[in-house]
Amino acid sequence: MKEPLTLPEFPRDEVRAAIARGIQQADELGEAVILKRKDKRKHLIYVASAVAVFSMTIGTAYVSPTFADTLSKLPIIGSVFKESGLPGLKIASEQGLTKAVGETQTINGISVTVDEVLYDESHITAGITIESDRELSQYYFGAGMNFTINGAHPNVSTGSYSENILSPSARTGISTLDVKLVEDMPDTFELGLLLEGENGEKWTFSTPIQKITEIVQIPVNHQQQIDGIQLHVSNISVSPSGISLDYEATVKGTIDHPPATIEFMLTDGQGREIASHSGGGKAQFDDGIWKLSSTKSFDPAEKNIEKLIITPYLAIPSAGEGIRVDTNNKKTNIPYKPSAYQGVEFQPFSVNIYLHQK
């Protein structure tokens, strides 16, 4: 059995300077990994997105070729977000809105480092680096990190996890928690992070975190009704890390026929589409009516735009199934039925907005 990987003694500041000088962006993209996780405590859905792979080269006489090769695959502290390929995380990191952590724990020869964290209007996001003294399986870390708030698990938890496989023994990861679904979410608290390995390892971290203040709230209060669907877009939040849109809707239906998901396309006044990301949501059934609510997330918009064009649409699955949980926690599978709202088309609407980013 190999001993846990340890780093040789060397002048840390000089090596980090050499690493920083040697950073270069690779052109290829990492593979997307889609993971789903469900347990008795909560239901989590993790959707990954492809992010850019990057590498580093160093030139120094202080490290062996083997050690230099390992370092070449790992980012320096504070660069996971910048090199993620996600504009919101890159901008937040460059503007100093993230918190650099840099704490490392090594268990069973696997070193996990929490690189930096971000708490904005919609999400808590944690970037990590992973280095092992042996090859790791593709899904070694399952659905990614679990989050706690002042030591307690959130009452509702959805989010995402994606990885960049840099080598068989090195990778980076990004975990998110959708905070809009969490009740009584504080602006400042002690964030707990737990990552589990497939052999029972548990890496546990804790760090204070505070919501960024660079958030502009824009009341929208737009409503439209079509074919029995009542849609209300209440608010848009704009920050350097992205745009979030809050909506509620009521849809007529039956308990065994959940409605399709309402999604949104955003474009600016120049016709440029703003990329969207996954977002958590709630669906409750009461007396023949489904009540939906969700926060949708988008990339940051270009600087100084004056208008957003918002186009709602139905995302109708072609197959699948649901799970109904009653008050006694009894679960019943709900078979898929084609949506009754195939032909519904919402009307686009605009929101006057002025974004000022430093």
Image (cartoon, helix red, strand yellow):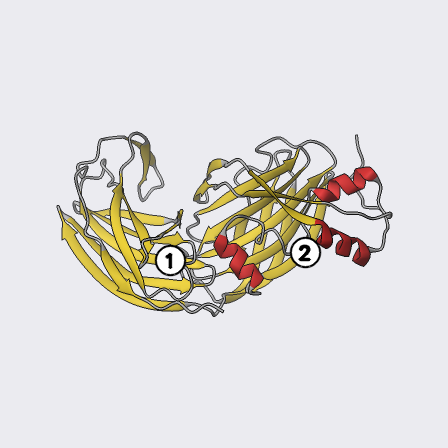
Point 55% across, 43% down: residue: 52
Which sits in the foreground, 17 or 152? Answer: 17
Q: Is residue 152 visible?
A: no
Point 27% across, 30% down: residue: 336
Residue type highlighted by circle 2: Gly
Q: For mark 2, what is the residue?
A: 102
Residue type highlighted by circle 1: Ser
Point 26% across, 41% down: residue: 260
Q: What mark, if any, has residue 90 been given in the picture?
A: none
Residue 308's x, y, as percent?
Answer: 31, 60
Q: In the displayed structure, does residue 107 sit left or right of residue 152?
A: right
Cα gap from disc 1 to disc 2, whole angstroms: 28 Å
Q: Is residue 93 above or below residue 176?
A: below
Total marks placed: 2
In this view, the residue farthest toward the front is 270
Q: For mark 1, what is the residue?
A: 244
Q: Are marks 1 and 2 in contact (CB under 8 Å)?
A: no
